[in-house]
Image: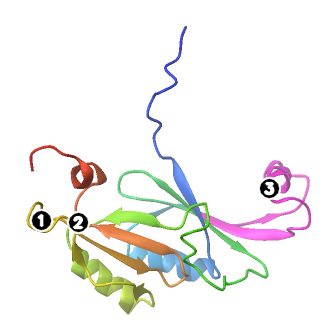
Amino acid sequence: MSQNTNYPRNFSHIGLSVPDLQKAIEFYTEVMGWYIIMNESVVKEDDSAIGLMSTEVFGKNWKEYKIAHLATGDGIGIELFEFKNNEKPDDNFKYRETGIFHYAVQDPDIEGLIEKIVAHGGKQRMPIKEYYPGEKPYKMVYAEDPFGNIVEIYTHSYELTYSQGDY
């Protein structure tokens, strides 16, 4: 059986490192509306299956971390990690460095969501903008959650925002 190597893979989950797991769970459930699928647990550097797998990923001497799993309304997983002795980056928006520098969500009430983010300790990084002024009624804004993760908010789906079709 031949496999199509150009099959569009589905997005499964994103892992976020946060300084306080309980505060992150509260923020993401109350502000983003995401729901808990696995409560907080502690993973230790030991001979358990998850301990060995974590050592393969992080190397030796990570000691332990806390982890919880949430999910978005469309079933995308949010894996939250709290590592001991975590460090706040000197610059959380190094957009010129390769790697992931933001995650994005969609909410038709962009003004309401940005207000909730700010009210819960996050930041609005720019004014809300019309994405295609005069062409589409779509808006976007960059924000920051209380843990320094950059979040982009769209009023419409990614496909509608960037497609050339009828609106």
Q: Residues within 10 Å of mark 3 (few under 14, many from 20)?
A: some
The relative height of residue 15 versus residue 163 in the rendered view (above or below) is below
Measured in 3D between alpha carbons, the distance from the residue under mark 3 to the one under mark 2, in whole angstroms, is 37 Å
Residue 82, position in %: x, y? 68, 74
Residue 27, position in %: x, y? 46, 79
Residue 130, position in %: x, y? 19, 72
Indicate which disc, 3 or 2, sits on the residue closer to the N terminus.
3
Residue annotated with mark 1: 137
Given this view, does label 3 or label 2 mark the residue nearer the observer?
2
Q: Residues within 10 Å of mark 1 (few under 14, many from 20)?
A: few
Q: Are marks 1 and 2 in contact (CB under 8 Å)?
A: yes
Which residue is at a point 22% across and 59% down the rendered structure image? 156
Indicate which disc, 1 or 2, sits on the residue closer to the N terminus.
1
Residue annotated with mark 3: 54
Q: Nearer the viewer, residue 70 or 89?
A: 89
Give the SS element for disc 2: loop
Residue 138 location, quadrant: bottom left
Given this view, does label 1 or label 2 mark the residue nearer the observer?
1
Residue annotated with mark 2: 155
* Extent of the magenta region: 41-68
Which residue is at a point 79% across and 82% down the rendered structure image? 85
Q: Is residue 139 magenta?
A: no
